[in-house]
Amino acid sequence: MSKAQTTFAIGVDYGTNSCRALVVNTANGAEIASHVYNYPTGEAGILLDPKDPNVARQNPADYIKGFVTSVKNAVKNASKTRVFKVDRVIGIGVDTTGSTPIPVDKDGTALAMLPQFKDELAAYAWLWKDHTSHAEAAEITAKAAKYKTKYLAKCGGIYSSEWYWSKILHCKHTAPKVFKAAYSWVECADFIPAYITGNTNPDTMVRCICAAGHKAMYNEQWGGLPSEDFLASLDKDMPRLRYTTKAVPSDQKAGELTAAIAKKVGLPAGIPVAAGAFDAHHGAVGSGAKAGTLVKIMGTSTCDCMPAPGDKKLPDIPGLCGIVDGSIIPGMYGLEAGQSAVGDIFNWFVKQLTPGSFGQGGEAHVKLTNDAAKLAPGASGLIALDWNNGNRTILVDPLLTGMLVGQTLHTTAPEVYRALVEATAFGAVTIINRIEEYGVTVKEVINCGGISEKNAMVMQIYADICNRPMKISSSSQTCALGAAIFGAVVGGAYRTTNAAQKKMTSVKPKVFKPIKKNVAVYAKLYKLYMQLHDAFGGVPAKTGKPQDISNVMKDLIAIRNEARK
C-alpha cells in the first residue's frame, strides 16, 4: 500500500474565538475526528477595552493551550476508530487568523506571557479585527505612495489598520514600554509552528509568505520586507524589527514536533510541521481552489481567496488585500480580498434590533430567514451598505460605517434582515467585478463556512446578485482540512498541493443557480448600491463633481412597487 493510503495528517485551525484540530485520512480527505477548544480569556476569547471599540486582543497562552488541548483530544477521539493509528500521523499543518502579530522577546516568548507584562494590553496578540491603528495605516499609505519603491502595488494601493506594520507603529505611539521590550513581532501563523517545533528564535524561525506578503509588504523583488530606510521614515526605531529570513509557502517545513509537545498531545516526536498561513488561504485549499476559482470563506467576516497561474504576469489590482506568489497554492499567485463583517452584521441585527417576538440567537436567525425568504427581490424598498465594521475591499477604509436607506413606517424586521444579507452580496460582487476589471476571470465560486452550509436563502441571494452558480465545499472544516493537506504534503504523502487537493477535497452536489428574474431586479438595485458605495466611500465621479444620489430613494420605491405587483 502506498503512503497516501495508510497515513493521516492533522490540521489545526485557529479562528477568532476558538481553535480546532482535525485528523484527516490523506488518501481521500475523510475527516476521522476533531476537537474544538474555546479561548477562555476575555469575552468569547477576545480582550476588549470599554474605552475604545477598536481594540481586539488575545492571550497567546490560549493559543498554546488550544493546540495541546485540541490536538490531544482529536487524537484521542481518532484512536477510538478502527482505521486510525497514532504512528501513521505523518504531518501537521497550522492556520490562524491574520494579521495577528504578537510582540515577543529574544527567545520568541510572547511578552504577554511574562509576569511584568500580564497587565499590559499592548503586550498581547493584536487580533486581525483590531482597528486601533487606522491613523498609522493612513500614514503608511501616504508615505509609501511617495516612496521610490512601490511597496503598496501588490497589496491594493492602501495599507490597512488590520495589518502588521500599522499595529506595530501604533504600539510605539501608545505603548512605548511594550514596543521597547519587543525584540520582534511574530504573526500568530508563525508563532504556533515555531512553538511546537522549538524553532522560536525570531532571527531564524520560519516565516510564512502568506502573512509576510499580504500584510507586511514582503516581496522578493525588493529584497523581502520594506527597506530600513522606508521603515525609518515611519519611526527611527522601526528598522530594528525588520527580519531578514526568507518567507516560504506552506509546502515547506517549519520544523518537527518536539518531544515535549508530542508527549502532551499523544503523538510521536519528529512529525513534520508545515509553515503556517492564514485560515482563509488554507480554507481555499481545503475547498479545492484552482485557477479561475474564487473561494469565499464565510463567517463573522468574509475572506475571498483566488489562485492565479504563476507563469502569467498579473496586473496590480487596486483595493485588493494582496497578490502574493505562493500564499494559497505554491507556484501560483494568491489573490486576497474580503469584507470586514458579514455574519457579524446578521448577528448584530439579531442581538440588538430584532423584536422579542422572533426569539433570541439561533431561533431568531431561523425565523427571520424563513420570513425574509418569502420576500421578492426589491419588494422591501430597502438597500443597505455592508460597512458595519468598515470596508476591507475595495475601499480599504475601517472608518466607514453601515447604513440603511428606504425605511418607512411599515418596514419589518425580516425586510431589514434580507436587506442586510443583500448588502453583503452586493459587497461580494463588487470584489468580483474589481478582479475581473483587471483581466482575471472568475469562472466559479465555491463557498465554505457555517453560513454557506446552513442558510440556503443567503446562498440563493448570492447566486442571484453575483449572477454565478454558488458551490459549497463538502467539508464543514475547510480551513483545518487545508492545513491537513499541507501536513500531508510536508509529510510526503503527496509531492504537490494540487495532487493532494485532487484526492482530499470535493464540493457538495447541491449548487445554487441564479434565477433569471431575480438577477434582473438585483442588477437595478446594484446600480443604486454602487451610487451609495461611491458617494459615501469617497470615490469621485467621472465628472469630477460630487456623486449625485438624489435619485436613490425614489428609484427604490419604483423597484418596490414593481416587485409587489
Image (tube, grey):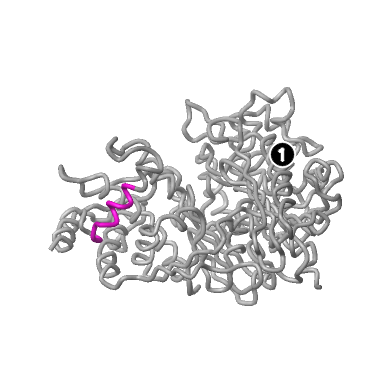
Please check the rendered image and state whether residue 376 is part of the magenta-colored stretch, yes or no: yes
Could you say which is closer to the camera, residue 215 or residue 490? 490
Residue at image location 57% in from the left, 71% down from the top: 314
Q: Residue furthest bottom?
A: 311
Check if residue 547 falls in the magenta segment.
no
The residue positioned 69% from the left and 52% from the top of the image is 94
* First to last magenta residue range: 367-377
* The one of 194 and 453 positioned closer to us in this rendering: 453
Residue that label 1 marks: 64
Give the x, y percent position of residue 229.
69, 48
Q: Secondary structure at mark 1?
A: helix
Q: Quadrant of residue 170?
A: top right
Which is the main secondary structure of the residues drawn in magenta? helix
In the rendered view of the protein, which quadrant contains the C terminus?
bottom left
Q: In which quadrant will I find the N terminus?
A: bottom right
Tell me: residue 513, above or below residue 403: below
Mark 1 is on which residue type?
Answer: Ile
